[in-house]
Amino acid sequence: MSGAFLALLRRDLLLAFRRRTELLFPVAFLLVVVSLFPLGIGPGPALLARIAPGVIWIAALLATVISLDGLFRSDYDDGTLEQFILSGHPLTLIVLAKIVAHWLVAGLPLVLLSPLLAIWMNLPMESLGVLIVTLLLGTPILSLIGSIGVGLTLSLKRGGQLLSLLVFPLYVPILILATAAVMAVADGLPYGAFLGLLTAGLVTSVTLAPFAAAAALKISLS
Amino acid sequence: MKTVKPRKNPLVMFIHKLGSPPWFYDFTGKFVPWLWAVFAGLTVWGLYLGLFVAPPDYLQGESYRIMYIHVPAAWMSMMIYVLMAFMGFIALIWRIRTMEIMAMNSAPIGAAFTLIALATGSLWGRPTWGAYWVWDARLTSELVLLFLYLGVIGLYKAMDEPRKAARAASLLALVGLVNLPIIHFSVKWWNTLHQGSSISMTGSKIDPSMLWPLLIMAIAMKFYYGANLITRSRVTLLEQDLRKGWTRGVIGDAAKERKS
C-alpha cells in the first residue's frame, strides 16, 4: 500500500521536475501579485507592514488555486485516473500522494519565498518566523481542501473558473487564523492558540479531505 | 429456499414510496396547497402583530420592526443549508432521485433567504450602526454562507447530466457543512458591533408582545420553505420525466405537443 503511495509520489515529482519552467509559474504569480500592492496603495512602510500578512496570505491563496487546476487534469485527460481507480489500490491513498506531490511542487516554494515577500512588504522581522509557520501549516490545508474542488469540477470544460467560487469560501477560516496569528505578534499578543487551531485544521483535513476528494473523483468519472 | 416477506412497517413503506416519482407527485399534490395557505395566514397574522400591534422599541424606535423579516430569514438561511446537506447525504448514499431533487431545489431558496438576511441586515444597520455594511462576524459569516450556496448552485447548473450534477453538488454541500460550526465559533471569538443574541435557550430578553410576532414569522417562513421546495420539486420531476409514461396523465396535451 505504501509502495503505491511512494511510487506515485516519485512519478509526480519526476513529471514536475521534467517540466521545470512550469514549476516557476505559481512562484512568479505570487511575486507579481504581491509587488502590485505597494504600487497600488503607496510605499508607506507603516501601512505596508500593517497589511503585509493579509496580502501575502491572499496572494498565496490565489497562487494555490491557479496551480490546483493541474492537480488531476493530465491524468484525467489521458485516462490514467481511470486506471488508478481500476488498479485496486485505495483511491484515497492515490489522491493523498498526488496532493503531497502538489504541495511539494506548488506549496513549498511559496513558503520558501515568504522571507523575500516579508522584506518587500516591510513586515517586522519578529513576525517573519510566525508567518513561515502559518504558511507551513496552512498551505497543505489549501492543497487538501482544494483537491475536493478540483475533483468536483474535473469533468467541466471551464472548471477552473468555478473552482475559485467553490474553494475560496472554504479557505476563509484558514485565512482568518493565519493572518490573526501574524498580526498578534505585531501587537504583542499571544499567538499560540491560532497556531494550535491551524494545526488542528491540518490534522483534520489530512484525515478527511482525501476521502472527500476520492468520492468527488468517482462522481466526476461516473 | 425461504422467501423473504416484504416489510410491512408502515413508516418504512411510506419512505419507500416517497422515492417513487409518480407517488411523490400525487402525494405532495394533495397537501402543498395547504402549506401555501398556512404560510399566507401565518405571515399576515405575524406581520400584523409585528408592524401594528407590537410597541416601538425604547432605543431603536420603529426601525427594529425589520427584525420580523431579518431574523427569520437569517434563521432559515442556516437551517436550509443544514437540511440541504442532510438530504444530499441521503441522496449520495441511497441514490434516491426525489431526494437529490429536493436537496438541489433547497439551494436557491436558501440563497434567497441569505440574500434577504443580508439586505435587511444592511438596511437595519444604517439607522443603528450608521453604516450600510459593517464587517462584523455575523454579516461576514452570512456572506460566506451566500458564497457556499452560490457554489452549490453553480456546480449543479454547470453539469449537463442532472443526477451526476446533484451528487457532485451534494458532496460540496456536505463539505461546506463542515464550515458551518467554524462560522458559529467565529461569531463567539470576535468582539462585534452586532448586538448580542437576544433569544437564547435559557430565557428571552425581549418583551412577549415583540417576541410572539417573531416566532409566528419564523414558523411562517418554515411553511414557505416547505411549500416552495415541494412546488419546485414537482416541477423538476415533471421536467426530468417528460418522456416517461406517468407524466402523460399529469400534463396531458402539453406533453404531446412538446414530444411532437
Image (tube, rainbow, N blue to C red):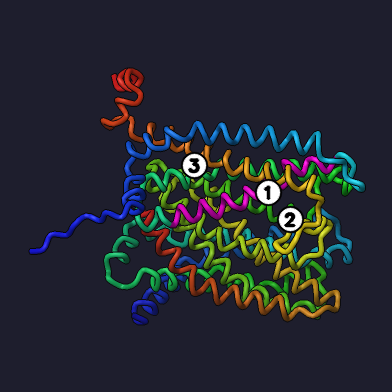
Is residue A212 rendered magenta in the image?
Answer: no
Q: Amino acid at mark 2?
A: Arg
Q: Amino acid at mark 1?
A: Ala
Query: Where residue B138 is drawn, which disc sits there?
Result: 2
Please state if B107 lies on the left or on the right of A83 as rendered.
right
Please state if A103 lies on the left or on the right of A12 as rendered.
right
Please state if B215 lies on the left or on the right of A206 as rendered.
right
Q: CA distance from mark 1 to mark 2?
A: 10 Å
Q: Amino acid at mark 3?
A: Asn
Describe the element under mark 3 as helix, strand or loop: helix
Write the residue at 74% across / 64% down. Answer: A54
Please state if B137 lies on the left or on the right of B172 as rendered.
right
Question: Extreme left residue here?
Answer: B1
Q: Is residue B199 visible?
A: yes
Describe the element under mark 2 as helix, strand or loop: helix
Q: Earlier in the sequence, mark 3 or mark 2?
A: 3
| Chain letter behind tag 1 | B
Q: Nearer the viewer, mark 1 or mark 3?
A: 1
Which span is picked out in magenta? B63-89
Q: Is residue A153 visible?
A: no
